[in-house]
Amino acid sequence: MSTALGTRRRRLGESAARPDGVPKVRGEFAFSSDLFSEGMLWGHIVRSPHPAAAIRGIDVSEALRIPGVRAVLTSDDVPGRKTYGLDYPDQPVFAWDVVRYMGEPVAAVAAVHPETARRAAAAIIVDYAPTEPLTDPVAAADAEPIHPLGNVLHRQRVRTGDPDAAGTVVVEGRYETGMQDQAQMGPESGLAIPAEDGGVDLYIATQWLHIDQEQMAACLALPLEKVRLHLAGVGGSFGAREDLSMQVQICLLALRTGRPVKMVYSREESFLGHVHRHPAVMWYRHHADAGGRLVKVEARIILDGGAYLSTSTAVTMNAACMAPGPYRVPNAVVEAVAVRTNNPPCGAMRGFGAVQVCFAYEAQMDKLAAALGLDPVELRLRNALKPGDSLITGQVLRGTAPVAEVIRTCVAAPLPAGVPMTTAELELPGGAGRTADRDRVRRGVGFAVGIKNLLYGGGFDDYSSARCRLEDGVATITCAAVEVGQGFVTLAQQIARDVLGGVDVVLAPPGTTDIGSAGSTSASRQTWMSGGAVQAACLAVRDRLLKSVSSRHGVPQETLDIVDGRVVSLDGQVDIPISEAARGDVLEETVDFHHAPTAELDVDGQGDAFVSFAFAAHRAVVDVDLDLGLVRVLEIATSQDVGRVLNPVQLVGQLEGGIAQGVGLAVMEEIVLDHGRVRNPSFTDYVIPTALDMPPVHIAALIEEPEPGSPMGAKGAGEPPMVSSTAAVVAAIRAATGLELPRAPVRPQDIALAGSGPGPVAGSGPITQEVSP
Amino acid sequence: MGADIVGELIDYQLRVNGHEHDVAEAWLGENLLYVLRERLGLPGSKNACEQGECGSCSVLMDGKLVCSCMVLAASAVGADIVTVEGLSAGENELSDVQAAFLAEGGVQCGFCTPGFVVSVHDLLEHNPDPTELEVREAVSGNLCRCTGYGRILAAVRAAQETRQE
Ligand code: FES
Ligand code: FES
């Protein structure tokens, strides 16, 4: 059975089809690992097996003798700066003298066949003298420095109000979140092709082409224009591609051999070769008055940054500023510190510092509600931020902030039915054959709400450039915004069609050669920033087109419109196709789009550091096998503050996908470390939710209050689903078990071995409900 | 380059999507996924793990769903292999499952998509009217990190309904 191709050309607000959808379902879309070039070699990176060691020597002679090996490179072969980094270049391209984490690159090989390259890599003899790794983030700040720049990567204090203020009810806790991996399906991969001008063309899956280019040029000792990046198909990213992976090494191999070089990480190498979500240890103390109004929040947050800086500065800033959650807090004493350890480097992952603190502050809100004898939802409503309120950074919320609305609509969703005794085994915790005793399955319901800042802030101007070129009735959009799967390409077409009256829209391939930076595909920013740039460029072209028609036909410009590819006037006098209206002229406009400026935080963490915020609420329903500690998440209900819906199907996809990663962090996902060694770098051992683990998502409400300052009124929607879903699931498990569970992910042993027989007691979730027989 | 590869090199033929393909001077240790992608110009099957855990490399071998990364290519001689590239009737056509993935929003980054499309074809071939639980179980060997599976399940339902009509 077959269906012919063809899609309706939908505008903003409708579920337009992805322009890359047809090649993707046919298997014809070229991902970065699908590339081929005549005569290409295969690259392979040699990585440290030790989390901490001195390098006494590297012997590559054996590797070079293997037939088919064309180059072996080490740090001595890096012609420019030997380190790189997004904020500060503290991370070696290849380690020399010392390795600081398991998986750190030490050498690279190019050979005619991937197996030859692997064998050559194995033949390189690195003489390591292992040292005692520093792996405890709590002890790291005061420990012997493991890097010349010290062990404190960033410290962010936020203080407001009276530090001595006290409430009548005080609750405290220590919380932890584990190291989560982005586990994007497309492995890191690329193809580097040496050019005749001595430069290099790199086809790569990344999140921000121009920032890669800058970092690479410094290491390769080449001028920017000789380091040309072209976006290859990206198989997901979620933060994993924010830092450089193989970019410098693969280009060095290509430049050295004069041959194209392809490199594809294995899954194990992907786990070792990109940054993870910072694990966090968080101490919290909440003060409230008897009426349940927050008086003060104290928090101390330690984030394990691993061996190198990456984006730890911004993650720390987010964690500190979002520490109390979406609540009004008059007094706060917060300190967040990211430390350097010999654990794997941590950096960007969806939610970026906001996820960890949400897990802690929402557990605290449940504790506080219990201490006050208040309904947890009611407690949240009493303290919910609203427009005009201030954050603990002193920033006044000038945009929309429908916190109470997301809470109310989410809890109003109907609860799923109880599980009958006849339920298929697959639908019980643990799946077929795992649940021992149906009578020992308990249901719990948990609730959480979160806040996420959108776009870059802290004084950084993360602009985006876009060009619109209208020629023969076809609009070509050029923008370096990276499509990682989120659907920017769809929106770019929708936006251009909206502004230019349904013209045909072609998207030029993103790269560094034709257009300026679009900034990163992260921080929920591309719809706002690059969407804004595309819209502005199209508006500029539209204006020129209508101006010229107006003067030629003697009709006022305000009476002209573009409808279905034709320029028409209100009075019907003008009605000509766009291609004719432009009279053969090519209309081209390039626009840099900037958001409202932000400020750096001062020493007390005060300042207008953020552009905008989005909020979401999640309610989780779980069944827990008390004896085996297995959890099945039955349903997640959610409401989200989205500003405006631009593409309903894509929006739902962001919510469901983000929630899946939140469920993963709640009950299964964690990089397991043993003295700095990664114990589970595979999908066999690092488990992510499958279709059997992932519950249906019930979208209770999408709150559409157009955000002032956002070009289309929309708020980025990718991160909020990840922020509070983990907290909601763990709250539900607490409700089912009565256990404190201060750590995510919740492991089976945390429940089953929790000591004196947990029972079905009313926990911290709003509702506790037993399995109905 | 043949002589430079470590290990034994062999020549053989594979039947993929109805066509015979020559594989010349290939290292014996290559898996079917590698040969499809790197030697036969069929990169539609993906390589998210190469450990049999993700299903992105799913193909049909003599009508059976397999992870091509777990099959030694040289052992597939004589088998009828169907990859994602062989599922639609022609250049400008989509299979019903492919069309449903598009229409329902089952595609984000798309890296898992070819594997899902192949395994859903296999499911509906053997069980034209699966329950939701049967669908979830059938595709539980395919990992997707982007969608949370909601739109993928909607796509399977849509394809199933089209076939019922
Ligand atoms: S690549 Fe074959 S199962 Fe993952
Ligand atoms: S769409 Fe990206 S992994 Fe499924």
Image (tube, coloured by chain):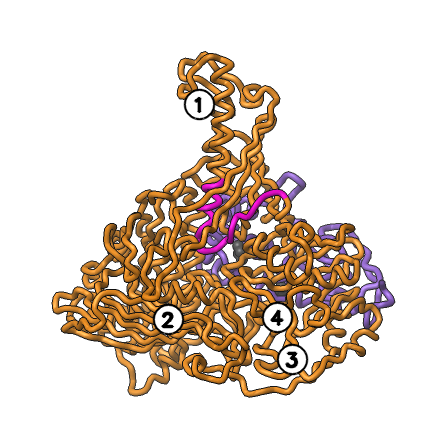
Chain colours: A orange, B purple
Q: Secondary structure at mark 4?
A: strand
Q: Position of residue A170 (x, y in %)?
A: 19, 75
Disc 4 beta carbon < 8 A from ligand 1?
A: no
Task: Decide which of tag 1 and tag 3 comes sooner along the chain.
Answer: 3
Q: Which residues are magenta?
A: A514-533
Separation of residues labelled 2 and 1 (CA atoms): 53 Å
> Disc 3 is attached to a residue of which chain?
A
Task: Decide which of tag 2 and tag 1 comes sooner along the chain.
Answer: 2
Task: Answer whether residue A518 is magenta in the image.
Answer: yes
Q: What's the residue type where badge 2 is placed?
A: Ala
Q: Which residue in the structure is indicated by mark 2? A: A336
Q: Position of residue A4 (x, y in %)?
A: 59, 37
Separation of residues labelled 2 and 3 (CA atoms): 31 Å
> Do the CB atoms of the residues marked 4 and 3 lie less than 8 Å apart?
no
Left-right relation of A732 to B60: left
Q: Which residue in the structure is indicated by mark 1? A: A561
Could you say which is closer to the camera, residue A332 or residue A183?
A: A332
Q: Which residue in the structure is indicated by mark 4? A: A92
Q: Is residue A736 visible?
A: no
Q: Is residue A633 visible?
A: yes
Q: What's the residue type where badge 1 is placed?
A: Asp
Could you say which is closer to the camera, residue A189 or residue A267?
A: A189
Left-right relation of B164 to A476: left
Q: Which residue in the structure is indicated by mark 3? A: A97
